[in-house]
Amino acid sequence: MSRWLRNYFEDRDSINEHVEGSCTNTQLGCSDEEFTKLTKMQSTPHERLTRVLPGKGKLPVSPVKMLVGRECNYNGRGRFSLSDSCHILSRYLPVHNPSVIDKMKSCVYVSQFSADGSLFIAGFQETGIRIYNVDLGWKIHKDIRARSLRWTITDTSLSPDRRFLVYSSISPVVHIVDVGSSTKESYANVTEIHEELQFSSSGEDYEDYNFGIFSVKFSTDGREIVAASSDDSIYVYDLEGRRLSLRIPAHQSDVNAVCFADESGHIIYSGSDDSLCKVWDRRCFVAKGQAAGVLVGHLEGVTFIDTRGDGRYLISNGKDQAIKLWDIRKMSSNVNYTPKRRYGEWDYRWMEYPEQARNLRHPDDLSLATYKGHSVLRTLIRCYFSPAYSTGQKYIYTGSTDSSVYIYDVLSGAQVAKLDFHDDPVRDCNWHPFYPMLVSSAWDGMLARWEFPGDGSENADPIRRTRRRRRFFY
């Protein structure tokens, strides 16, 4: 253990004299009654379907029992409700029989399903972006060679109508591509135009770019995109007017993640290396010029955030090796809060997280729940809520530096599955919006598909090769 780390733990008691409870153990799972009730409502079957046979109904209800209840019309509707369907589907997790969709020579950095699950997009470090047609057996729909690629593709976002794709790199320029065109090999400005969306007002030359875009997302109506950048700012771009409509000096360090909170597009969430998540209300930002609130709880930087889609709840992944669940109604109004790192010399890109720090808790932690077990080192690992349609969002899942995918129960905080297959960090992973299918995207260049097998058989432990130690800086 390095000298600075020994000094930190030796002096920890003196720190506690000034900040009571700063080193209490973190409690896992969610105890918030309202969130618990909301989650259970989305995945609990109709009470009459739980009592097909005499006696007290117990959860979970077997699929056979529920089918009998449906055929006998015990719920009075003659069909399953969405919560009935979620109760059944959420029991069949996509954790078996990994198969390789594609294998490239460069790292996979980002990936996503389209909203209807028909397309899958993967962004690679050196070779650009591939779009796969899921319905046609994962046939390559479009192979995109990116323009002005600096280091890697940092993010991609598909428009809600699946017509356009935007991609970002470590530069202040986002490019937009026509996904619906007939051109399969899309070479930037050679076979197809990749239009530039300029996020810098100074018009720098390519070699002089002084910041990059780490995260980019379409609004629900497809008229705007929001971006997070390394100049500590959030940007909103008006696609119809082809202009930058808003720049927010949002944080005190790199903004690693950003998204719209819900369909309205008024609320924006952001997460930064300053360890804070912030909430921005565009309706009052012009008048106030500051965040609507701040979410305090992470001890280290935030690598990713995902909204539940209801304008109320979100999760964030942190370099303190934890996912946190937030309710923005509990956010702090102290928008000028200045976080202080307890061990400033630690760098997640090449150092292991101190074992003694894993159970520390922020004294002002506002989160509803904390989920631990995975590893967030070397790169900006991503996490998500499970799909609303098939699981009722009762799980959260994340990639991990230890080459695995972790699935947690959102209420109990328990780890319900760990998916081992890759040889290098799993930076991104994506659950199909409707089917029990999950795709993991890793630095070993592989896209792996996980499913629930129809015969119920489990896959054998994969053969693990010696891991290659990569030293990447993003």
Image (cartoon, rainbow, N blue to C red):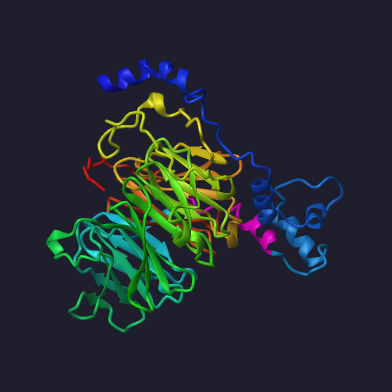
Numbered circles on residues, count: 0
Q: Can residue 185 be seen in this view?
A: yes
Of residues 235 and 8, the one nearer the viewer is 235
The x, y position of residue 257, in whole percent, is: 38, 53
The x, y position of residue 372, in whole percent, is: 47, 37
At a point 41% along the width and 16% down the height, the residue shown is 14
Of residues 369 and 446, the one nearer the viewer is 369
Of residues 291 and 304, the one nearer the viewer is 291
At a point 23% along the width and 56% down the height, the residue shown is 211
Specify whether 53 is left or right of 170.
Answer: right
At a point 49% along the width and 62% down the height, the residue shown is 432
Name above or below for residue 28 compared with residue 132.
above
Name above or below for residue 11 compared with residue 349.
above
Quarter holding residue 99: bottom left
The x, y position of residue 455, in whole percent, is: 55, 56
Specify whether 19 is left or right of 37.
Answer: left
**Going by the picture, which residue comes out furthest to the right?**
54
Which stretch did the figure color magenta?
82-96
Q: Is residue 459 visible?
A: no
Specify whether 63 is left or right of 439.
Answer: right
**Residue 327 included in the magenta stretch of the image:** no
**Going by the picture, which residue comes out furthest to the bottom?**
182
**Going by the picture, which residue comes out furthest to the front?**
287
Q: Can you say which quadrant of the picture contains the N terminus?
A: top left
Name above or below for residue 351 compared with residue 174.
above
The x, y position of residue 213, in whole percent, is: 29, 58
Specify whether 189 is left or right of 427.
Answer: left
